[in-house]
Amino acid sequence: MNSLNRRAAWRIAAVSMLLAALASPVAWFVAQERAEESTVSLAIEESQRLLHHFGAIDLDGADAEVHANSAAKTIAGGLFDIAEIYNAKGERLAEAMTAEGAQVEGVLLHHASPAYSEASYESLKLPDGGWVLRIFVPLRIAGSALAPITGYFEGVRIVPEWQRAQMLANALSAALMIGLASLLCGAAIYPVVVRLSADNEQKAREVLDSHLSMMEALGRAIAKRDSDTGVHNYRVAWIAARIAEKLGLPNKEMQSLIAGSFLHDVGKIGIPDAILLKPGKLDDEEFAVMRTHVAQGEEIVSGIGWLDGASDVVAGHHEKWNGAGYPRRLAGEQIPLAARIFAVADVFDALCSKRPYKEALGFDAAMAILEKDTGSHFDPGVMAAFRPIARQVFDRLAGCSEAEACRLLEERVRLHFGM
């Protein structure tokens, strides 16, 4: 399992466990409530059935108390442990209770005369840990929900231990099922996420590969115009990446640095051949034209989303630490860090490379020039990072062909572009 899949697995597992932890208590509570409401509904239905059976709906007649007492005695001992029947005025006509009901009656709070219009209930916990349901039912003529209220029934049911245990077991079962469903859902989602992630990664790699191919094509186009820049692009981008690694740049900035270093002279495409390929020294007017390659390069890479970061190097690779560079005469930390890193890499490679107009310098001679210009041309902080690796960089690039330099840069690209 690769690191991406491991991260996906951990995240899905964490979310699944969180959902299970949140959903299970809710499921337990809902199951408890439904079990309680089911018990209450059954009790209300049964009480109404018995009251109608005994004719106790008419609670204003001469035999109202007889009917009420008969119904109350029958109801108490069935679903209820205490049964009370009131007339329409809220006057109690009858009360009956079991031995268990008599034990809890003193604990229950007494209330004012009933005057409610809808059935309701209270769930009460007793001091000894017992549980009772107190039910309030307005009585009407059978089959007429809009008929006037003829009386009231109030009953107390002591929920037996076995029923409480059953309700608890059912609630726990529901909670466990919801928790298990959450975990199973996570397990089912994981392969789908991995597959989608793999597809997305493949597409991202294809897009990145096309971007890098475009970068290489631009680099080759520069090389066709200026034969000195072919291997130089690969070498200088590799050196800049090594310095940036020493400085601890994050991958996103590393990607911009590598692209900018490779394309630093892309603006030379717009310089006339008479100036770009002139074998001798440029005059002031020609040099002014040559300097425009910076602005032209910036225009080329700007507006291409993935190359936007490259503009730091393209636009700033001729700036100097002391502000004597061009085109903006930036100084110190006004110059983007990527451009300051590139400046060291560019000059070091130029000094150590053979060109048609000069021989390559040795390591000590090249470093002496860099040290002399540190604080004027080069950022002292960047030089401090380069010194410890300079000899290793020099030895690695000594006699390096363009193909070998390309392979070296590919290693950094794969490392920092996640390929």
Image (tube, helix red, strand yellow):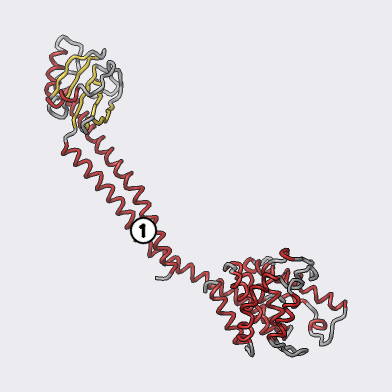
Q: Is residue 258 visible?
A: no
Instruction: Please determine whether, in this image, residue 95 is positioned above or below residue 218.
Output: above
Instruction: Please determine whether, in this image, residue 389 is positioned above or below residue 11.
Output: below
Tag 1: amino acid? Gly
Pinpoint residue 413: horizontal percent, then vertical percent: 57, 76
Residue name at image x 54 percent, y 76 percent: 414
Pinpoint residue 221: horizontal percent, then vertical percent: 69, 81
Q: Among all residues in the image, which is located at the extreme right?
A: 284
Q: Among all residues in the image, which is located at the extreme top?
A: 62
Quadrant location, the N terminus: bottom left
Q: How many marks?
A: 1
Task: Say which quarter of the image contains residue 188.
Answer: bottom left
Q: Is residue 98 visible?
A: yes
Nearest the camera: 369 or 354?
A: 369
Instruction: Please determine whether, in this image, residue 265 is positioned above or below residue 98.
Output: below
Residue name at image x 26 percent, y 12 percent: 89
**Taking 324 as reference, is 396 left or right?**
left
Residue name at image x 70 percent, y 85 percent: 364
Task: Say which quarter of the image contains residue 43.
Answer: top left
Element at label 1: helix
Residue for badge 1: 186
**Taking 148 as reference, is 327 left or right?**
right
Pinpoint residue 385: horizontal percent, then vertical percent: 63, 73
Residue name at image x 67 percent, y 82 percent: 220
Pinpoint residue 246: horizontal percent, then vertical percent: 60, 73
Please rate how many residues cluster around mark 1, counting C-alpha atoms within 10 Å: few if below 14, some from 14 to 19, many from 20. many
Nearest the camera: 159 or 119?
A: 159
**Taking 77 as reference, is 330 left or right?**
right
Task: Say which quarter of the image contains residue 387.
Answer: bottom right
